[in-house]
Image (cartoon, rainbow, N blue to C red):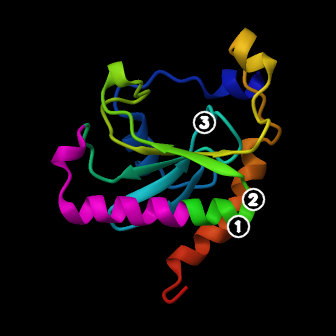
Amino acid sequence: MSYILNNIKKHTGCILCEEAKKNDDRKNYILYRGTHSFVIMNLYPYNNGHLLIVPNTHESDIDKLPADELTDLMKVTQASVNILKQAMKPEGFNVGINIGKSAGAGIPEHLHIQIVPRWNGDTSYLTVFDETRVVPQLLEGTYAQLRPYFEKLRTPGS
């Protein structure tokens, strides 16, 4: 609960753009920065390793992103899924884009792809009856686990 209370902030602009402008990637849970996109951990994850793949361009609609940015977004999504497979050994994934508030986009003003690793039995009665999720690892621990894998994306030839 202290984590949630300490991280609830009033944002006047786009939270994703605000986080991308900050210099402390560890503090802001940014795992990777590329030419056209970045990877950030979801502050309120559905499961351990819940990632957001975000285009650097502030755009709400997939139709408005240039082809090179869309290609990069999918390449980074693919690399992120592969990293999660290596680091966390999930049994499956939910990967998706919610475009617009009515489609469930939590940040409708900035397009992003969500990746949620899944394991058999990873939901419990708490989710069904009390709309509560149990995530067994602190974000700091997940960040420390994933960061070395994302560092390799920065190294040419790896």
Query: Mark 3 near mark 2, Cβ–Cβ under 8 Å?
Result: no
Query: Mark 2 near mark 1, Cβ–Cβ under 8 Å?
Result: yes
Pointer 3 residue: 43
Residue 61 in percent (x, y) is at 23, 39
Image quadrant of residue 99?
A: top left
Q: In this view, does 102 lie to the left or right of 8?
A: left
| Residue found at the very far top of the displayed protein | 129
CA separation in Å, label 2 and label 1? 6 Å
Q: Is mark 1 on a helix, strand or loop?
A: helix
Q: What stretch is highlighted in magenta?
A: 61-80
Q: What label sits on residue 148 in the rendered view?
A: none
| Residue found at the very far bottom of the displayed protein | 157
Query: Mark 3 near mark 1, Cβ–Cβ under 8 Å?
Result: no
Q: 10 Å neighbourhood of mark 1: few (<14), some, or many (≥20)?
A: few
Residue 41 in percent (x, y) is at 58, 46
Mark before the other along the chain sequence, 3 or 2? 3
The amino acid sitting under disc 3 is Leu
Image quadrant containing the C terminus: bottom right
CA separation in Å, label 3 and label 1? 22 Å
Please tell me which residue lies in front, 102 or 107: 102
The amino acid sitting under disc 1 is Gln
In the depicted structure, whether residue 149 falls above or below residue 46 = below
| Residue found at the very far right of the displayed protein | 136
Q: What label sits on residue 89 in the rendered view?
A: 2
Q: Nearer the viewer, mark 3 or mark 2?
A: 2
The amino acid sitting under disc 2 is Lys
Residue 12 in percent (x, y) is at 36, 24
Residue for point 48% across, 87% down: 156
Pointer 1 residue: 86
